[in-house]
Image (cartoon, grey):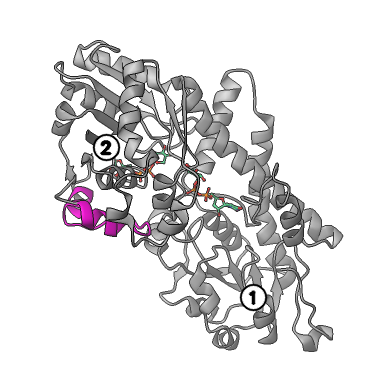
Amino acid sequence: MNVTCIGSGYVGSVTAAAFAALGHHTCVVDVDPAKVESIRSGSSPIYEPGLEALIRRTVGKTLFADTSFASVSEADLVFICVGTPTAPDGTADLTYVKSAAESIGRHLSKDRFTVVVDKSTVPVGTADLVSRILAETSGLEPGNHFAVVSNPEFLREGFALEDVFFPDRIVIGAEHERAFGMMRELYRPLVKRERFGEFLGDMPFFEEGMNRPEAVWFETDTKSAEMIKYASNAFLAVKISYINEVARLCEALGANVQDVARGMGLDSRIGEKFLQVSSGWSGSCFPKDTAEFLATSRKADSELSIVRAAVESNRDMHRFVVRKAERKLGSLDGKTVGILGLTFKPDTDDARQTQAAFIIRELLAAGAGVRAHDPKGMSMFREVNPDLPVHYCDRPEDVAEGADAIILLTHWREYLELDWSAIGDAMRQRYVLDTRNFLPPNRIVELGFELEGIGVPPRKPAAACGTAVETGH
Ligand code: UDX
Ligand code: UDX
């Protein structure tokens, strides 16, 4: 089939590369010529494991890129994958979606039936809005010449290829049988796992993915599909906020949240996923999607008070981390804090709206100096937070220089391999706050560090507390 994807960001570039790998003739359209050039030359416009290899393998064969919308007139399916930032009132800003719809409308052909798919996360009712814009700009008739479908993405950054090729479910919202039929045909190679090995056979997730059950295909109306996306992301945010609050209570009462989460997750009704403690959830999806869902629920006079509580609790979680370091250091004024991890999670360069920005801002406000490192996200973090006077370090070990504390915010695997002995030598005092309960406690404590996690008993070096006690993490 002929596919066009509008937008080559985190979602668009992965979606386009995936359809190209499944053998569909796919064109990515982006207003940013640098991104288009990057794809044409076989490199990925964003960092996502495996994506560059997939682009390199498909570009010029089934994958193409352009700044022009011309390919729309030949397309069977057009995916809208542009950004949907948060407007000041919390709702999703649909400026880019609307302008993409207008441009698509101007290129729709009256000689074919085109399915226009909302892939971006958009508020309930957006499919109807896009349909109206397409009808106005093209003069064509919905249902006859084109149809709008909602097909929300469920891609986790860092695991986006795995999620796109081996999803739990594919949700399709449509109002026309012909549109459902075209979506079934588009996804058939993915659901049936045809042509998989050709481009993916050597990818690390491939074997495990092939052993997973096939994706569940789920058809519904457009509004329900749009709602499924928001309700899912908000539910996951609630789940993390919940375990993070339980962690704080564990800390107050002397229980170990690692064991509590494991014990809870063994109940298949709860499930073990998304019970990992953190300094709070963040990133380019959860904050924006919870804000939109909440704003919409208020407008409809049906406020989602649980989502409101999860958002508030999450901000408290960021503050809790700062207070914890402050408690340990007495005062933050004049102290130096080393931050490991600026992205909202590992294996991404995405540093938009991260908890690190919130936490660093609070540390600076309390008078601390901040040295920071991230393996992939440093340049984006600096770009989106130009006001933060942070000393950025090229090597992770350098955050320790004269530091009174190190706070690990993102559990990048390479932080396990650091020379913690040299780090200790460079610090003014050996204190680490590991907000992901990720570092191997024995190894760190043996080097004379005092190690605190979240919701787990603190660990002190043997000399300071008698014997080192093994905790569950
Ligand atoms: C998208 C959606 O916005 C969001 O709703 C979803 O939940 C996550 O995926 P993302 O792919 O991360 O966001 O967006 P971004 O990385 O900002 O990429 C959007 C791309 O669209 C950019 O490359 C931008 O240049 C391009 N764009 C934007 C257009 O081509 N046309 C426009 O009019 C606007
Ligand atoms: C999310 C959804 O998972 C995905 O389905 C959706 O389509 C896009 O939004 P993403 O934002 O890439 O994906 O990241 P995700 O892995 O969901 O993590 C979100 C945040 O929650 C991160 O800050 C992460 O560190 C945090 N998190 C996640 C926890 O703190 N604990 C957990 O157990 C899981």
Q: Which residues are magenta?
A: 35-58
Disc 2 C-beta below 8 A from ligand 1: no
| Residue type for callout 1 | Pro
Assign the N terminus to one quadrant of the image: top left
Q: Is residue 151 left or right of residue 78?
A: right
* Residue on which disc 2 sits: 5
Q: Residue at x 36, y 44 (%)?
A: 193
Contact? badges 1 and 2 (CB < 8 Å)? no
Residue positioned 60% across, 57% down in the render: 362
The answer to whether residue 348 is seen in the rendering is no
Q: Is residue 264 above or below residue 186?
A: below
Residue 145: name its quadrant. top left
Q: Which mark is residue 440?
A: 1
As displayed, is residue 140 above or below residue 183? above
Q: Judge whether residue 384 can be spotted in this image.
A: yes
Alpha carbon distance from label 1 to label 2? 43 Å
As drawn, the label of residue 148 is: none
Where residue 232 appears, as percent x and y from the top left, is 56, 36
Q: Name the side, left or right, on which 221 lies relative to 202.
A: right
The kind of secondary structure element at disc 2 is strand
Using a 10 Å C-alpha cutoff, classify the residue at mark 1 as few (fewer than 14 neighbours), some (14 to 19) or many (20 or more).
few
Q: Secondary structure at mark 1?
A: loop
In front: 114, or 415?
Answer: 114
